[in-house]
Structure formats: structure tokens, C-alpha cells
Amino acid sequence: MGDQGAPVLIHEAPVTKPCDYMIATSDTFQGKTLGLQWQWQAHENPSWYQRSGNLRLFAYPAASLFHAGQYLSQLMQAFNSCWEIPVTVHFTSDKQRAGVAMMGYSYRYLCLEQGRIALYDGAAAEGSRREKEVVRERLITSIPFAENTATLTMEIADGQVNFGYDGQTVGEPFVMTPGGWTCSRPGIFCADFGVGDHKTAWANFTEVRITDLDL
């Protein structure tokens, strides 16, 4: 628009200040609602979680993490970062898992289970658009672990991911892949890969700390 609101055919672009705004990534889960950085893998079910000074995720059933609607993820906001996730679990079955993951058509996650910490690989293959993806998961390695609390870590650097817990590295680096119309998506979860016991089995996430890695 020109002087006094009169339309013009050509005009210099207005000078604006650059915007450095980014939504939050880390979360201490103290708010009444989840932050804008989080997204479920399906339409939100309020019974998946509870807010009480932390984030409690219940062990709803899942055939695979790829198809688990309760997977809570973020879009990648930095190429190089470190996730630290203190988590406490209360499980009633050895099929229940809670942890941190990097999701894509090929994915990997580190989780707490009954009596151990385990690292899993997953892969999803598309058939037709009318058919559900075929997903296969396999155990890579496990470490005996008697506690029900651990700090899980996930370091993302130059397209590769390293997992660990309490200062120890678990497994070899994993190469990130996209997942359909989305990029790779880091996130947290709690699920029962058996019949599902969401009433008495859960995982408490006190916070998710995400820091930039200076490479």
C-alpha cells in the first residue's frame, strides 16, 4: 500500500528485523499442558498420560514402536544435540518398555525393562497405500540392570545417533532415516509389547534435557 492507503503496483520491500525465535526443546513437565515441541504419533488419548509434577506415561499396548500412537516426539530442531532423560519405571511384565528413540523407517530405541536395559532396532516396509506397514523389531543387546531408575542418553551428531545410560555407551552408532512424510523424529515412550497393562504399569519422566553439541 502507498501513501494514505492507496494501492501501488511496485514498492520496496519493508525492512524488518531478523527473527531468532525457536520453540522450546527441553521440558521439565511442570506446565498444565504439554509444550508446543511435543507431538503424539496418533490423535491424542488423554488416558495415555498423567501430569503430576512430572510426565507419567502408561504402558498401553503396542505391536511395535513404529505403530505406537503413544510415542511422544519432537521435530528435529538441531542437527547436533544431546538428550538426557531421567526415567523411573513401575512394570508388571517383562514385555513393558520405556525409553528414548529415534524414529524413521529404520529406527532404534534404548529402554528400561524389568531387570535390564535393552537396545532395539526396528524397520518398517511399505506395501501399498491401503496396507499397513510391515514392521520388524529385533533386540541388539541388553545389560542386566536391577534398578528401576536410570538416566538414558541419546547423542545426535552429523546424522548419526549414539545411545547410552548413566554415562555408559550402548551399541554402535545408528544412521538416521526419514519416516514417510516426516523427518527422523526423536522422542520418548512407554508401551507394553504384550497384552497391555496401562492401569498399573507406567514410566515417570521428570524432565527431558536437550543441549546443543559443539562439534
Image: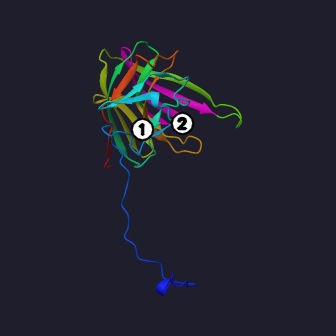
Most foreground residue, 170 or 49: 49
Place residue 179 in its image quadrant: top right
Q: Earlier in the sequence, mark 2 or mark 1?
A: 2
Q: Residues within 10 Å of mark 1 (few under 14, many from 20)?
A: many
For the point 52% across and 22% down, the residue is 138
Any mark on residue 43, and which?
2
Between residues 110 and 205, which one lies in front from this camera angle? 205
Q: Is residue 25 above or below residue 130?
A: below
Residues under labels 2 and 1: Cα distance?
Answer: 28 Å
Residue 206 location (% of width, % of height) = 30, 32
- Region of the chain picked out in magenta, as a range: 101-125
Tag 2–tag 1 contact (CB < 8 Å): no
Give the residue type at disc 2: His
* In this rendering, position of residue 127 left or right of residue 68: right
* Residue at which label 1 appears: 161
| Closer to the eye: label 2 or 1 | 2
The spot of residue 35 in percent (x, y) is: 38, 43
Q: Does 94 appear above or below 8?
A: above
Tell me which secondary structure the magenta stretch mostly adopts. Answer: strand
